Amino acid sequence: MNAQELTLAQAASQLTPADLRYLNENGLLGEGPAHAQEGVVGETVAREKGPPAPKRKRRTFKHEWPEVGAVLEADYLGERYEAEVVAAPRYKSGRAVRLTSGPAAGQVSPSLSGAMLKATQAQREAAGLGRMGASSGWKFWRAKGDAHGQKE
């Protein structure tokens, strides 16, 4: 502790719970973790709180997985990525995505979004992008074609 912090600590140690209540009621106590609000005897000063914030509802979307064996493709920052939908009975969807190109080739992900992140991770790290440009695997991947070479 420096000299100023030591002086402040000594002054604070002499405050009573009544002093703390007075300071709190008059808005003289700061906000945040840097401002201790406990008295010498350990009494915590109560703050007035507003109503709790309403919980946000989680949005869910119904997506149809491509059939097992479907080949997926995507373009990201000039690179082309390919993947294949494989059977994965241990997952809720019963399917997973196995990457077939790029630095992450051979890796398997239980979701299209996870596969997107794995596929583009090296490129995003090299460009210092973090998750920028990587939003939803459902929008990222598209079916390359069925067994007859036609677009789906």
Image: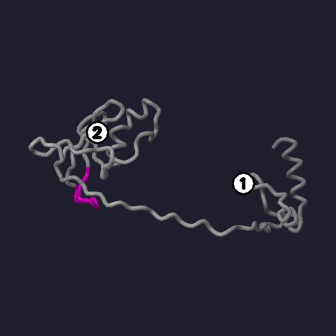
Quarter of the image where one finds residue 59:
bottom left
The residue at the far front in this view is: 151
The span picked out in magenta is: 88-96
Question: What is the crowding at mark 1: few (fewer than 14 residues within 10 Å), some, or many (at least 20)?
Answer: few
Name the spot of residue 120 as percent of width and height, x first: 36, 37
Indicate the secondary structure of the residue bearing disc 1: loop
Quarter of the image where one finds residue 4:
top right
Residue occupied by mark 2: 74
Amino acid at dot 2: Ala
Q: Is residue 56 left or right of residue 107?
A: right
Cα gap from disc 1 to disc 2, whole angstroms: 46 Å
Please name the residue shown 81% across and 43% down the image.
1
The correct choice, above or below, for 112 with respect to 51 in the image is above
Counting the numbered discs, the total is 2
Name the spot of residue 94 as percent of width and height, x first: 23, 59
Residue occupied by mark 1: 33
Please name the residue shown 32% across and 44% down the image.
140
Please name the residue shown 24% across and 39% down the image.
82
Amino acid at dot 1: Pro
